[in-house]
């Protein structure tokens, strides 16, 4: 089984992936590292890490799809996580491998930008926090862009009947819902040896 966790940057994807790994023993890989590695090792692929995640995702998709296919053919249970994942790509894999791929996306389409700024400042600052040294005006500008990304992701998830979880109002509850959703898939799927008792 393969699980895909996409969504806007700063929506809680890494948080969910880490909790799923801790709770269910499901290994995961962050596709941000893949994008950075490809950009550095093969500049001819023209992966612009400063462009929008959807654009990066489209350039990266042939490689991600190939990796996903190998995982599925080898019957390994894995979670791929990253902002570069797009709902139509997830749908492509789900159609190619019926019953073997599940996906969900996170976003903050309904967020109040002032509250989100507070959340970023209160809970940010980790080693991978690329907003940490930005001033508030720049952070709010980027959050507004990511809110629009979330609106687009929510609409696409609805189109493809893929779960979308809104993390803007009750962040911790939304993260718990996402973890529970993946946990339910794990416990009803096949080929996973992790603990499913919660």
Image: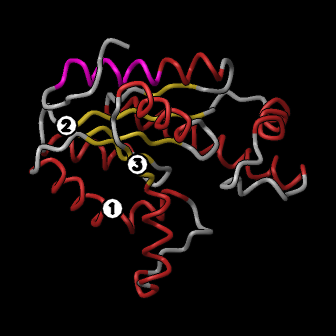
Distance from Cα at disc 2 to Cα at disc 3: 19 Å
Where residue 58 sits, quadrant-wise, is bottom left
Q: Which label sits on residue 73? A: none
Residue carrying label 2: 1
Assess whether residue 179 is covered by the magenta stretch. Answer: yes
Give the mark count.
3
Where residue 103 sits, quadrant-wise, is top left
The residue located at (71%, 48%) in the rendering is 126
Q: Which label's residue is closer to the chain start, 2 or 3?
A: 2
On screen, residue 147 versus residue 8, left or right, reads: right
Q: Along the line of sight, which residue is nearer the eye, 162 or 133? A: 133
Distance from Cα at disc 3 to Cα at disc 1: 9 Å
Q: Along the line of sight, which residue is nearer the eye, 113 or 117? A: 117
On screen, residue 127 versus residue 194, left or right, reads: right
Residue 117 in picture, x, y percent from top left: 82, 38
Mark 1 crowdedness (10 Å alpha carbons): few <14, some 14-19, many ≥20: some
Residue 80 in picture, x, y percent from top left: 36, 47
Which element type, helix, strand or loop, lies under badge 1? helix
Residue 68 in picture, x, y percent from top left: 23, 53
83 relative to 154, above or below: below
Which element type, helix, strand or loop, lies under badge 2? loop
The residue located at (46%, 85%) in the rendering is 43
Assess whether residue 110 is covered by the magenta stretch. Answer: no
Q: Are marks 3 and 1 in contact (CB under 8 Å)?
A: yes
Q: Are marks 1 and 2 in contact (CB under 8 Å)?
A: no
Q: Which label's residue is closer to the chain start, 3 or 1?
A: 1
Question: What segment carries the magenta color?
Answer: 178-189
Residue carrying label 3: 86
Mark 3 crowdedness (10 Å alpha carbons): few <14, some 14-19, many ≥20: many
Residue carrying label 1: 61
């Amino acid at each position: 089984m393969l699980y895909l966790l996409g969504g806007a940057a700063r929506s809680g994807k890494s948080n969910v992936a880490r909790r799923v790994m801790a709770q269910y023993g499901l290994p995961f890989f962050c596709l941000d590292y893949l994008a950075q590695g490809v950009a550095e090792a093969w500049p001819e692929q023209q992966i612009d890490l400063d462009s929008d995640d959807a654009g990066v995702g489209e350039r990266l998709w042939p490689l991600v799809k190939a990796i996903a296919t190998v995982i599925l053919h080898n019957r390994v249970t894995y979670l791929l996580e990253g902002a570069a994942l797009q709902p139509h790509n997830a749908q492509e894999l789900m159609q190619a491998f019926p019953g073997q791929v599940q996906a969900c996306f996170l976003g903050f389409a309904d967020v109040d930008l002032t509250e989100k700024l507070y959340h970023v400042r209160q809970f940010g600052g980790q080693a991978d926090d690329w907003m940490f040294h930005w001033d508030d005006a720049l952070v709010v500008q980027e959050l507004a862009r990511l809110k629009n990304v979330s609106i687009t992701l929510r609409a696409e998830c609805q189109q493809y009947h893929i779960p979308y979880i809104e993390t803007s109002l009750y962040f911790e509850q939304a993260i718990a819902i996402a973890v529970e959703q993946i946990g339910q898939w794990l416990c009803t799927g096949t080929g996973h040896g992790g603990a499913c008792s919660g």
